[in-house]
């Protein structure tokens, strides 16, 4: 792909319009596929482009063939593209690069990220013999995404820009699509009620602030407004699918203003199948949040998926990840921490935003940590101001945390002034201790040997005292588990890697930790873990003795 980018950069120097530069690159790729023609062209010594170059492209029914700039070294370019070994994936990432990464070229409005295309392809689940309709196809990146079905599916697309149609037709020829009909046209000049429908539809509507459309009298979403720019495209395309349609639109249209009519319409028609809320900042120069709206027919339930956390930061923007996991969620139609299935009767007619329903559901399925606590406080450094009335105590730090099970070893014995603060800070058996700072949360639980000792947690330790010892063991096991560690890391990360009493008391824990079965299993795990911890401690002590520590 690097070589192809170099060729594009060279050709771009001779053109003011980046569409023209891209079209010329694709023309050279098409000519290079004809080995005999390209051989003949490379033997010609004249500087001017031979007429056969253009007549061959016209024979492929590639309309509006772009003329090659006479100052461009066509033999150099042709030889370079002949040496390339390109596949459809290379072309897809080439377009991704020049459109969405090299934003200075200003092509980003005409392409959809590769990852979004892959997700939509999986959602539509194309089958052999199906027809696919793609209005406003832009640079044809969706065409590249469905390349695996190019021999079995009939692809139909329309775009208002002739240069985009030329580019996409060239891509279709390179990919050897068997049934591909691409037209220049204004979809809103076509009949509102279609005389033809397609099995599957995908549309990434352009957000055109200058667009001013009068809704047809048959429209159920009239009047169209400038605050809901995608709605005319959605209404037009939603009338043309037989089985399934997927749209990319701003999430605000599912809960605000003019979008309320869209929500009510989708529910009334039984079209709403699913909504997938996407991570922010995945489309260049777009400050809005976006989602995927998935429509099918005769639905009675809507499936809401929130994947805003499924991203990887790449440069200035974010990249959608975990595509297969999202598709598994969509196929399962199960309630999870990221998804929720609701009957239409339980869906607000003016709000189809996944996070609205998932956050409400999760609150019902959560329990606040503070409700399980007797107290919560931070350790502190106790300074002795005088040598009078001193008492012996143990200064307990993170270094004293046992790896697994009860912490029963208190090594640093010190004298401190006998004051009220010592009494307040003293830790007790079954207190669960957390590090207050760090990327990786550290956790321990205090054993019975602390009952008759004065043990003082130093600064940097947070003490959680639970109402009963059983729940202390349950939460200790949960905090140490894989899911618990991920949960804590998220809290630490959201608080700049530092937590305090207020933060921890307010955290919402999964409600299943209160289930009798979970409590029993956690108690059994704790007993096994503590037994292993005792053995580990003995081994560590033996090693220290062996090494004369």
Image (cartoon, helix red, strand yellow):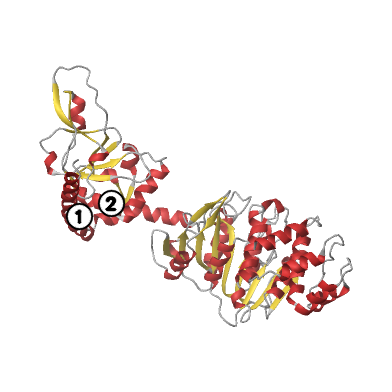
Question: Is residue 189 at all visible to an observer of this figure?
Answer: no
Please give the name of the residue rendered at 65% of the width and 70% of the height, measured from the top-left corner.
86
Place residue 194 in its image quadrant.
Answer: bottom right
Outermost residue toward the left?
452
Question: Is residue 364 at all visible to an observer of this figure?
Answer: yes
Q: Nearer the viewer, residue 525 or 371?
A: 525
Name the side, left or right, on which 245 lies relative to 211: left
Using a 10 Å C-alpha cutoff, classify the residue at mark 2 as few (fewer than 14 neighbours), some (14 to 19) or many (20 or more).
some
Give percent across and percent down for residue 101. Answer: 63, 54
Place residue 156 in its image quadrant.
Answer: bottom right
Using a 10 Å C-alpha cutoff, classify the residue at mark 1 as few (fewer than 14 neighbours), some (14 to 19) or many (20 or more).
some
How far is the residue under mark 1 from the one under mark 2?
A: 11 Å
Q: Which residue is mark 1?
A: 529
Are the residues tagged 1 and 2 within 8 Å (C-beta)? yes
Give percent across and percent down for residue 94. Answer: 65, 62
The local secondary structure at tag 2 comes to helix
Place residue 135 in its image quadrant.
Answer: bottom right
Name the side, left or right, on which 522 lies relative to 44: left
The local secondary structure at tag 1 comes to helix
Quadrant where the C terminus sits is top left
Please give the name of the residue rendered at 86% of the width and 72% of the height, measured from the top-left corner.
44
Q: Which residue is mark 2?
A: 480
């Amino acid at each position: 792909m690097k070589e192809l980018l170099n060729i594009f950069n060279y050709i771009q120097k001779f053109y003011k319009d980046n569409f023209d530069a891209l079209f010329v690159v694709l023309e050279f790729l098409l000519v290079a596929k004809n080995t005999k023609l390209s051989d003949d062209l490379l033997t010609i010594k004249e500087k001017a482009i031979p007429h056969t170059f253009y007549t061959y492209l016209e024979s492929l029914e590639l309309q509006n063939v772009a003329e090659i700039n006479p100052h461009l070294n066509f033999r150099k370019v042709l030889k370079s593209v002949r040496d390339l070994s390109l596949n459809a994936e290379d072309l897809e990432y080439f377009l991704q690069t020049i459109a969405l990464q090299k934003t200075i070229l200003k092509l980003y409005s005409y392409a959809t990220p590769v990852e979004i295309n892959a997700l939509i392809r999986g959602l539509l689940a194309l089958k052999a013999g199906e027809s696919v309709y793609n209005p406003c196809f832009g640079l044809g990146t969706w065409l590249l995404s469905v390349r695996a079905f190019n021999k079995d599916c009939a692809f139909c697309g329309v775009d208002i820009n002739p240069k985009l149609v030329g580019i996409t037709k060239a891509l279709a020829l390179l990919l050897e699509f068997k049934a591909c009909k691409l037209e220049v046209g204004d979809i809103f000049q076509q009949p509102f009620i279609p005389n033809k429908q397609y099995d599957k539809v995908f549309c990434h509507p352009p957000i055109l602030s200058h667009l001013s459309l009068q809704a047809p009298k048959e429209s159920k979403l009239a009047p169209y407004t400038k605050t809901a720019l995608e709605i005319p495209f959605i209404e037009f395309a939603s009338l043309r699918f037989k089985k399934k349609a997927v749209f990319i639109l701003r999430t605000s249209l599912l809960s605000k203003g003019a979008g309320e009519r869209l929500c009510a319409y989708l529910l009334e028609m039984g079209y709403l199948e699913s909504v997938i809320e996407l991570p922010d900042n995945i489309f260049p120069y777009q400050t809005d949040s976006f989602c995927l709206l998935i429509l099918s027919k005769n639905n009675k339930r809507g499936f809401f998926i929130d994947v805003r956390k499924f991203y990887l930061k790449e440069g200035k923007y974010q990249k959608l990840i975990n595509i297969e996991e999202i598709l598994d969620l969509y196929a399962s139609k199960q309630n999870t921490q990221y998804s929720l299935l609701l009957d239409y009767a339980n869906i607000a007619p003016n709000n189809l935003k996944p996070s609205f329903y998932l956050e409400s559901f999760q609150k019902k399925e959560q329990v606040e940590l503070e409700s399980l606590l007797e107290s919560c406080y931070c350790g502190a450094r106790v300074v002795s101001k005088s040598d009078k009335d001193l008492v012996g105590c143990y200064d307990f730090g993170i270094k004293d945390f046992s790896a697994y099970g009860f912490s029963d070893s208190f090594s640093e014995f010190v004298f401190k002034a006998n004051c009220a603060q010592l009494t307040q800070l003293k830790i007790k058996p079954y207190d669960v201790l957390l590090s207050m700072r760090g990327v990786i949360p550290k956790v321990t639980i205090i054993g019975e040997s602390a009952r008759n000792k004065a043990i003082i947690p130093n600064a940097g330790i947070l003490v959680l005292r639970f109402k009963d010892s059983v729940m202390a063991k349950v939460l200790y096991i949960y905090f140490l588990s894989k899911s618990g560690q991920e949960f804590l890391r998220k809290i630490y990360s959201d608080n700049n890697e530092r937590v305090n009493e207020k933060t921890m008391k307010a955290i919402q824990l999964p409600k299943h930790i209160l289930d009798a079965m979970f409590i029993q299993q956690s108690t059994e795990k704790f007993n096994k873990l503590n037994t292993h911890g005792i053995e580990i401690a003995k081994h560590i002590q033996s090693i220290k003795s062996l090494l004369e520590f």
